[in-house]
Image (spheres, rainbow, N blue to C red):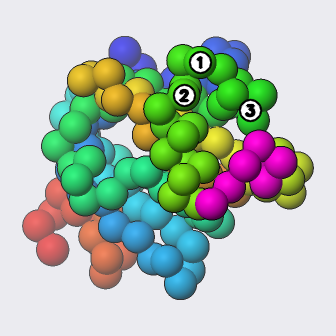
């Protein structure tokens, strides 16, 4: 499987990645997800303008089989019920709030894991890059 999945596959962003580390900069509104993809390479996914995440330290070690972007209307579908209920309860949100956030440029990224879990990240954007250490070097060099 080629990673990340290239358009025109609709709203699919990447597949088959094991979560190594999750860190967040709540003040800066960023979520950093370090993953290992099928080829064995480490990548870093950065969610910028992050408002909410169901991914946290307890997600480390899980394998993401698919990440896709969904609309607020899709969030209301029965297949996303568990993740949606958790989002609404933890954020104190409702459908109107989510639609307003979406209109303001936020996106709903849903992560499907190999064990059948679904995890939502509500953020302005998602960027993927080669994994780097916090000092700006390549993580594979052992800095």
| Residue segment shown in magenta | 92-98
**Residue at image location 41% in from the left, 70% down from the top:** 24
Question: What x and y, as percent, mark residue 23?
Answer: 34, 67
Q: Is residue 6 visible?
A: no
> Above or below — where is 95 with respect to 130?
above
- Is 117 left, or right, of 49 in this rendering? left
Residue 125 versus residue 94: which sits nearer the camera?
94
Q: Secondary structure at mark 1?
A: helix
Q: Secondary structure at mark 3?
A: loop
**Residue at image location 17% in from the left, 43% down from the top:** 61
Residue 52 lies in quadrant: bottom right
For disc 1, the marked residue is 78
> Above or below — where is 88 with respect to 84?
below
Label 2–label 3 contact, CB within 8 A: no
Question: What x and y, as percent, mark residue 83?
Answer: 49, 37
**Residue at image location 22% in from the left, 53% down from the top:** 58
Q: Secondary structure at mark 2?
A: helix
User: Which label sits in the foreground, 2 or 3?
Assistant: 2
Question: What x and y, as percent, mark residue 111?
Answer: 45, 34
Residue 20 versus residue 121: which sits nearer the camera?
121
Marked residue nearer the N-terminal end (2 or 3)? 3
For disc 2, the marked residue is 81
**Residue at image location 54% in from the left, 18% down from the top:** 79
- Disc 2 to disc 3, how far (Cα)? 14 Å
For disc 3, the marked residue is 71
Label 3–label 1 contact, CB within 8 A: no
Label 2–label 1 contact, CB within 8 A: yes
User: Which label sits in the foreground, 3 or 1?
Assistant: 1
Residue 26 versus residue 95: which sits nearer the camera?
95
Residue 25 versus residue 100: which sits nearer the camera?
100
């Amino acid at each position: 499987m080629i990673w990340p999945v290239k358009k025109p596959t609709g709203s699919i962003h990447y597949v088959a990645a094991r979560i190594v580390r999750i860190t967040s900069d709540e003040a800066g509104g960023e979520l950093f997800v370090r993953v290992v993809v099928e080829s064995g390479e480490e990548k870093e996914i950065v969610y910028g303008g992050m408002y909410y995440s169901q991914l946290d330290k307890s997600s480390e070690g899980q394998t993401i089989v698919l990440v896709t972007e969904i609309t607020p209307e899709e969030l209301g579908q029965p297949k996303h019920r568990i993740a949606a209920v958790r989002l609404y309860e933890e954020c104190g949100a409702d459908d109107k709030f989510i639609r307003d956030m979406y209109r303001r440029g936020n996106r709903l990224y849903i992560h499907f894991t190999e064990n059948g879990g679904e995890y939502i990240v509500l953020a302005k954007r998602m960027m993927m890059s080669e994994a780097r250490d916090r000092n700006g070097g390549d993580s594979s060099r052992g800095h």
